[in-house]
Image: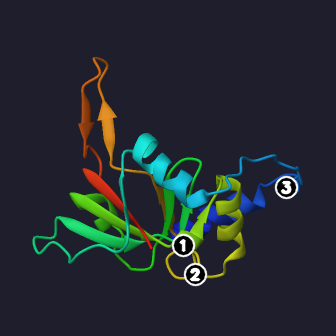
Amino acid sequence: MAAKENILERLRANIGERFEMPNIAINAIHYDNVVEKFAETCRTVSGADVVMGTPAEEDERGETSTVHGDIGVAENGCIWIPQREADRSFLFRSEHLNIIVKASDIVSNMHEAYARISESEEYFKDYKYGTFISGPSKTADIEGALVYGAQAARSVTVFIE
């Protein structure tokens, strides 16, 4: 038995009482124009550029990667990107990242996004991984020096189709 399976089997054997997820009514935020709010939030909160349309050709030096996002979230400007290829590192090693999302795939809030993810059989089928990305990577030190591209892309451009 593989080490991972051995660990999981031992964990399962020691699980006590299980509880069902409660069904709680959540009064989540809702926007009448999710595309407009999503674009605004991407620009102001996550620091991504937003363009209506599709990106130009790929950068020949490999500094720019383009990926299709499946769900855009208007409340925080993040985009759900499921893993569809064996190598997911391009999401984090590219200098510049283009993310394409359809206007029809933009929802108001994270509750709606997670509902779509949990309802879809496509997600997690092959690689069992997905991530929300919200703008370029950035970090700041205690004195407030802001650095872009610290852990991932230095710039993110969101293309809304």
- Rounded to the nearest whole Å, what is the CA distance between mark 1 and mark 3? 22 Å
Query: Which residue is found at the position 68% from the left and 69% from the top?
Result: 116
Label 1 secondary element = loop
Vertical arrangement, residue 112 with respect to residue 17, above or below: below
Query: Which x, y percent locates residue 70?
Result: 52, 71
- The image quadrant that residue 128 belongs to is bottom right
Query: Which residue is found at the position 52% from the left and 73% from the top?
Result: 2
Mark 1 vs 3, N-terminal side: 3
The local crowd at label 3, few if under 14, some if 14 to 19, many if 20 or more residues have their Cα within 10 Å, is few
The local crowd at label 1, few if under 14, some if 14 to 19, many if 20 or more residues have their Cα within 10 Å, is few
Which residue bears the numbered disc 2?
A: 125
Give the label on residue 139, or none: none
- Rounded to the nearest whole Å, what is the CA distance between mark 2 and mark 3? 23 Å
Query: Which residue is found at the position 65% from the left and 53% from the top?
Result: 109
Q: Inspect this view and state whether residue 91 appears.
A: yes
Query: Which residue is found at the position 53% from the left and 70% from the top?
Result: 103
Q: Are marks 2 and 3 in contact (CB under 8 Å)?
A: no
150 relative to 130 in the view: left or right? left
Q: Are marks 2 and 1 in contact (CB under 8 Å)?
A: yes
**If the image is split into quadrants, where does the C terminus sit?**
bottom left
Which residue bears the numbered disc 1?
A: 128
Query: What colour scheme has been applied to the protein in the rendered image?
Result: rainbow
Amino acid of disc 1: Lys
Q: Are marks 1 and 3 in contact (CB under 8 Å)?
A: no
